[in-house]
């Protein structure tokens, strides 16, 4: 049985300014996105695009800025709507109290989708092309977020068997060992999803299938990890014994698989009719 290390959430003090580890993980996530997205510029089909359709470093910077806005606004609004709609309906001004915590990945993802739509429209580029460009660069950022969760000792897992070698006691969660679900999510929806998606995106694909693979892959990995993660205390388990996180993953899994199959079938029909 392991004990969660008592890590100071503040990484460094710069005079009156306190730099938190969680903020640094966000910076690391954005830095990784910039690095990976610039690598994507050298990959097909983006390396072959010319003229107005060509991608540049400026495009990467712009889509990162829009994506950050989408993550912050969508993540906060999504948390308020998905997890505590009644509370925030009664206390609407607290929607803006982001320092109190409360962000939703699924809301953040919807915010990123809106950002991609805006980018595609403003640059006159196909939306599926934009989504395919962004998708493989996202999982490492998710992994950094889980590092922040672990450092803060939050979003811990469900009770584990005392015999589990990596079972961990988290402060504020009692004296019994729990699954370090932040680590599970770091490995599955972060690093493993990145490796699979990056490999998948390196080969020629039907436009939109890389984004569809991200939706399906994240949905499956997050759905699986939720079996080991303690549900939110104010929600508990919902119908069919599933958590809110799992229910929010269901449309991702179905939508990702459906989009991939539809795109594949549409391309097959077009090839046969040509």
Image (tube, rainbow, N blue to C red):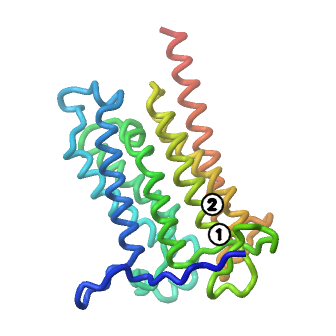
Q: Is residue 123 above or below residue 61?
A: above
Q: Secondary structure at mark 1?
A: loop
Q: Residue at x 26, y 47 (%)?
A: 60
Q: Residue at x 65, y 50 (%)?
A: 220
**How far across and how far down the image is residue 2, in percent?**
67, 75
Name which quarter of the figure residue 53 lies in: top left
Whether residue 212 is visible here, answered yes or no, is: no
Judge by depth and name the residue closer to the eye, 72 or 165.
165
Judge by depth and name the residue closer to the eye, 177 or 142.
177
Q: Secondary structure at mark 2?
A: helix
Q: Residue at x 62, y 86 (%)?
A: 171
Q: Is residue 36 above or below residue 174?
A: above
**How far across and how far down the image is residue 267, in percent?**
51, 21
**How far across and how far down the image is residue 183, in percent?**
59, 63
User: How busy is the neighbourhood of tag 1: few (under 14 within 10 Å), some, or many (20 plus)?
Assistant: many
**Labels 1 & 2 near each other (Cβ < 8 A):** yes
Whether residue 237 is visible here, answered yes or no, is: yes
Name which quarter of the figure residue 13 lies in: bottom left
Mark 1 to mark 2 CA distance (whole Å): 7 Å
Q: Is residue 108 above or below residue 42?
A: below
* Left or right position of 250 against 193: right
* Left or right position of 153 against 179: left
User: How busy is the neighbourhood of tag 2: few (under 14 within 10 Å), some, or many (20 plus)?
Assistant: many
Judge by depth and name the residue closer to the eye, 77 or 90.
77
**How far across and how far down the image is residue 10, in percent?**
39, 83
Q: Is residue 116 above or below residue 270?
A: below
Q: Pointer 1: what residue?
A: 180
Can you say which quadrant of the picture contains the N terminus? Answer: bottom right
How many marks are shown on the rendered structure?
2
Q: Pointer 2: what residue?
A: 184
Residue most toward the bottom? 16
Name which quarter of the figure residue 228 lies in: bottom right
């Amino acid at each position: 049985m392991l004990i969660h290390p008592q890590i100071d959430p503040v990484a460094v003090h710069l005079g009156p300014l306190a730099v938190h580890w969680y903020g640094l993980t966000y910076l690391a996530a954005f830095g990784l996105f910039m690095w990976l997205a610039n690598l994507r510029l050298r990959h097909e089909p983006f390396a072959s695009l010319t003229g107005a359709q060509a991608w540049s470093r400026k495009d990467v910077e712009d889509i990162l800025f829009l994506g950050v806005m989408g993550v912050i606004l969508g993540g906060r609004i999504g948390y308020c709507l998905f997890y505590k709609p009644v509370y925030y309906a009664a206390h609407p001004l607290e929607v803006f109290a982001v320092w109190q915590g409360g962000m939703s990945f699924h809301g953040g993802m919807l915010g990123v989708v809106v950002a991609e739509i805006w980018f595609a429209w403003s640059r006159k580029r196909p939306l599926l092309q934009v989504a395919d460009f962004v998708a493989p660069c996202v999982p490492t950022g998710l992994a950094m977020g889980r590092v922040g969760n672990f450092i803060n000792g939050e979003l811990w897992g469900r009770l584990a068997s005392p015999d589990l070698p990596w079972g961990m006691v988290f402060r504020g969660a009692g004296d019994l060992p729990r699954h370090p679900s932040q680590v599970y999510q770091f490995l599955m929806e972060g690093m493993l999803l990145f490796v699979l998606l990056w490999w998948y995106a390196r080969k020629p694909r039907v436009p939109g299938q890389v984004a569809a693979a991200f939706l399906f892959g994240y949905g499956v990995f997050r759905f699986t990890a939720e079996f080991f993660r303690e549900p939110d205390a104010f929600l508990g388990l919902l119908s069919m014994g599933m958590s809110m996180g799992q229910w929010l993953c269901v449309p991702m899994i179905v939508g990702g698989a459906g989009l991939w199959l539809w795109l594949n079938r549409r391309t097959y029909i077009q090839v046969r009719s040509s």
